């Protein structure tokens, strides 16, 4: 290095280390279960507040884990007619519906070549345990098309071991494109109203173009349909974190 | 409406009713009213006094209470008379009681005979000329007239109807909320009248309710939530069958 005036080069202090605090990063990704967000309507928000108090009360006693549509869960319920008085079912969550205490989720599995779907209520007292065997998201919010897909995409081993994952990792998005059985399907999944990204359509081009006839491109610009939940979500998150820490 | 679970794991749907600023307004004795029992006028939700003339405010001024949206009458026996001006709370009812709930049904406007009375109408094809949702024949030949009360199109809904024998599952004393089994006539946030059930099966079902009513300044301290015996409370662990 060429030194200025023959003197030794000026002392450059080393660059300050950038400390990446894992805890603050983790707080940025907070999960709020979708049944807490009140739907748009004319009901008094006080009714949702009362319902939320009950939901929080149940969550304090029984742990409802974070899961998304596309994760594989194992649910044990109490059954008076079973031999051990309890039943365990493993399946992929294809739909999460309902708001408030009546929130439900549908698990699907193929057992001995028979497709089985069971709709469980999240807050039902008959549920004894919910374990997340594999936590992941898929490209769609609603996987009802798995009914018309090849059965291999809905089969999950009943004695599957839970897939371990680190706490700070992002939830993986499974970009799987599913292959379908030949038509007719239960719903016309190629139509733009379902907006499905997780199917590998092997239909001829003219059929895909014909399906676009039912598209409604004005819907995304319709201002009356907008429902901005960010502020409501913030309030509910604060309320939840305060109550659950008590 | 909300789901509620029993200790055996069964689900029931429940309607939430809020007791909002109810006050007793006036006592009308048996002779004055000309009926079989004495009456108590009770007022509901508070509302602004500026939209009605001063003459309409007399009842409220006597009782010392702001103007109420709805004033209803309850027939009471002589030992259940309450002084005008006392507030009424949800704790007046107890879980395990049975109530009748009256309200104005949702107004549907002028409706045809299929929706209003459940007529079957006519087939859509096979030669029907301009006749698919019409009432058809009005009467017989022999009658030579149309009877009074014939079911015809007209204004549907917006009339008082009662649901009888609804069980009270839970009472929230802090916010004055009654959890009543099943559905109740009327739209969300409409005014509703709740009375003890008149059905003969529930005549002796009332299990020592507070008589004549629950007084907030009295001595008894009620917990925030009163539950029926069969309800699954969320503080308990999950249900197991032995």
Image (cartoon, coloured by chain):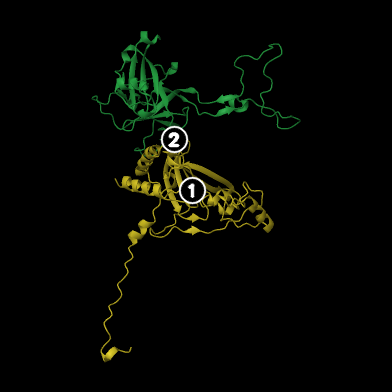
Chain colours: A yellow, B green
Of the 4 image quadrants, the one containing the N terminus of chain A is bottom left
Residue A153 in the image, given as x and y percentages of width and height = 56, 54
User: A186 or B48: which is nearer to us?
Assistant: B48
**Above or below A117: residue A2:** below
Q: Are marks 2 and 1 in contact (CB under 8 Å)?
A: no
Residue at position x 33%, y 59% in the image: A24
- Residue at numbered disc 2: B3
Query: Could you tell me which chain the residue with mark 2 belongs to?
Result: B
Q: Residues within 10 Å of mark 1 (few under 14, many from 20)?
A: few
Q: Disc 1 on helix, strand or loop? A: loop
Q: Is residue A107 above or below residue B41?
A: below
Front in this rendered view, residue B214 or A220: A220
Q: Which residue is mark 1?
A: A226
Element at badge 2?
strand
Q: Is residue A199 left or right of residue A79?
A: right
Which of pointers 2 and 1 indicates the residue nearer the eye?
1
Is A210 or A179 nearer to us in this picture?
Answer: A210
In the figure, is residue A152 to the left or right of A103? right
Task: In this rendered view, identify the residue nearer to me: A146 or B191.
Answer: B191
- Distance between the Cα atoms at labels 2 and 1? 29 Å
Category of crowding for the residue at label 2, using alpha-carbon neighbours closer than 10 angstroms: few (below 14), some (14–19), many (at least 20)? some
In this rendering, the count of numbered labels is 2
Numbered badge on residue A206: none
Residue A193 in the figure: left or right of residue B201: right
Residue B228 visible in the snapshot: no
Can residue B138 be seen in the rendering of this structure?
A: yes
Using the image, name the chain to which the residue with label 1 belongs. A
Q: Tell me which corner region of the image, top left, top right, bottom left or bottom right, holds residue B239.
A: top left
Q: Position of residue B83 (x, y in %)?
A: 29, 18
Q: Residue shown at 33%/20% (left/top)?
A: B58
């Amino acid at each position: 290095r060429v030194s200025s005036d023959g003197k030794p080069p000026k002392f450059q202090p080393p660059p300050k280390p950038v400390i990446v605090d894992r805890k603050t990063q983790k707080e940025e990704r907070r999960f709020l279960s979708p049944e807490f967000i009140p739907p748009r309507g004319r009901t008094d928000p006080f009714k949702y507040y009362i319902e939320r108090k009950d939901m929080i009360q149940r969550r304090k006693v029984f742990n409802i884990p974070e899961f998304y549509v596309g994760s594989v869960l194992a649910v044990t319920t109490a059954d008076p007619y079973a031999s051990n008085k309890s039943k365990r079912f493993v399946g992929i969550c294809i739909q999460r519906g309902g708001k408030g205490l009546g929130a439900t989720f549908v698990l699907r599995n193929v057992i001995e070549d028979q497709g089985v779907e069971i709709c469980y209520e999240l807050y039902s007292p008959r549920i004894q345990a919910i374990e997340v065997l594999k936590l992941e998201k898929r490209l769609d919010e609603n996987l009802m098309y798995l009914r018309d897909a090849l059965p291999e995409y809905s089969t999950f081993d009943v004695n599957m071991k839970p897939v371990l994952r680190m706490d700070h990792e992002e939830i993986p998005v499974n970009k799987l494109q599913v292959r379908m059985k030949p038509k007719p399907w239960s719903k016309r999944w190629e139509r733009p109203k379902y907006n499905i990204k997780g199917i590998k359509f092997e239909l001829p081009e003219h059929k895909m173009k014909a399906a676009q006839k039912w598209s409604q491109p004005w819907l995304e610009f319709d201002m009356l349909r907008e429902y901005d939940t960010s502020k409501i979500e913030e309030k509910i998150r604060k309320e939840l974190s305060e109550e659950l820490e008590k | 409406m909300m789901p509620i679970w029993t200790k055996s794991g069964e689900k029931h749907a429940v309607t939430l009713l809020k007791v909002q600023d109810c006050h007793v307004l006036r006592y009308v004795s048996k002779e004055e009213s000309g009926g079989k029992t004495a009456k108590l006028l009770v007022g509901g939700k508070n509302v602004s006094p500026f939209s009605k003339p001063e003459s309409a405010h007399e009842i409220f001024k006597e009782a010392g209470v702001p103007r109420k949206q709805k004033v209803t009458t309850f027939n009471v026996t002589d030992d259940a008379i309450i002084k005008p001006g006392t507030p009424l709370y949800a704790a007046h009812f107890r879980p395990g009681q049975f109530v009748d709930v009256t309200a104005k049904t949702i107004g549907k406007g002028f409706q045809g005979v299929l929706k209003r009375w459940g007529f079957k109408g006519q087939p859509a094809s096979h030669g029907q000329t301009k006749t698919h949702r019409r009432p058809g024949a009005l009467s017989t030949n022999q009658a030579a007239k149309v009877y009074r009360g014939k079911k015809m199109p007209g204004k549907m809904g917006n009339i008082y109807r009662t649901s009888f024998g609804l069980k009270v599952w839970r009472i929230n004393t802090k916010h004055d909320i009654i959890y009543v089994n099943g559905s109740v006539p009327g739209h969300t946030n409409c005014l509703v009248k709740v009375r003890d059930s008149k059905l003969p099966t529930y005549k002796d079902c009332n299990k020592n309710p507070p008589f004549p009513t629950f007084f907030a300044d009295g001595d008894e301290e009620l917990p925030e939530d009163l539950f029926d015996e069969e309800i699954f409370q969320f503080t308990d662990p999950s249900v197991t069958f032995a």
